[in-house]
Amino acid sequence: MDEHAADAYDLGAVDYLRKPASPDRVAAALRRVIRTLPSTEPARSPVPDSLTAIPVETRGRTRYIKRREIVFVEACRDTVKLHTFSGIHPARMSISQLAEAWEDTGFVRTHRSFLAALGSITELRSDPTGSLVAHTELGDVPISRRHARAVRERLFRAANKEDPEY
């Protein structure tokens, strides 16, 4: 039997099971195999620390808006508008960049043109036209049908403390 194991390892085997194998032993072997497989997802680059604060240029001055100050983000052509309690601040970047970078930081994509901080959403409701909106202290943020399920799930998890950024 052991000669077969040696042959298997010579061929690049990750593990070797002998009959009868317990379910725990099979599971451990499968975990080892999975760890050796190449990832099917492209490697995600780490979120740069610079995205914890966004540079905003106004009249020759640069101000940094901290992520925690932002209630929601609105896309406007090649820029975004950062909605905060201190005002609306335009920044030169795409909403897709922010959505990807802030995916795990308590922000949720509500619409192709909007991101909202989960902790700033006080309720979901229908507007007069029947469209779903996320209500914040700074106004309503539209929720597209495409993003509605994800928004509801993230809010539910956050309300049940499964999302630490809420």
Image (cartoon, rainbow, N blue to C red):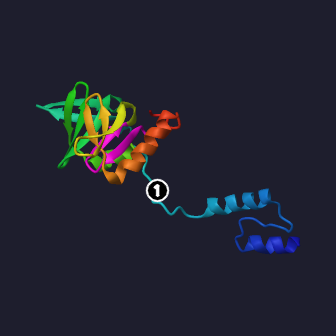
Q: Is 111 part of what is drawn in magenta?
A: yes
Q: Can you say whether 61 is above or below 150 in the image? A: above
> Quick one: which residue is furthest to the top in this view?
86
Q: Is 162 part of what is drawn in magenta?
A: no
For the N terminus, the image quarter is bottom right
Q: Looking at the image, which residue is at 39% across and 31% down?
A: 119
Q: Can you say whether 146 is above or below 79 in the image? A: below
Q: Front-most of 89 and 116?
A: 116
Q: Which residues are magenta?
A: 105-117
Identify residue for label 1: 43
Q: Front-most of 57 and 98?
A: 98
Q: Looking at the image, which residue is at 20% across and 28% down?
A: 87
Q: Looking at the image, which residue is at 36% across and 34% down?
A: 123
- Few, some or many residues within 10 Å of mark 1 (<14, 14–19, 20+): few
Q: Position of residue 117 (x, y in %)?
A: 36, 36
Q: Quadrant of residue 102?
A: top left
For the C terminus, the image quarter is top left
Relative to 54, is 40 on the left or the right?
A: right
Q: In this view of the protein, can residue 106 be seen by the observer?
A: yes
Q: Position of residue 60 (x, y in %)?
A: 12, 32
Q: Quadrant of residue 10?
A: bottom right
Q: Front-most of 101 and 117?
A: 117
Q: Can you say whether 2 is above or below 27 in the image? A: below
At label 1, which amino acid type do we have? Answer: Ala
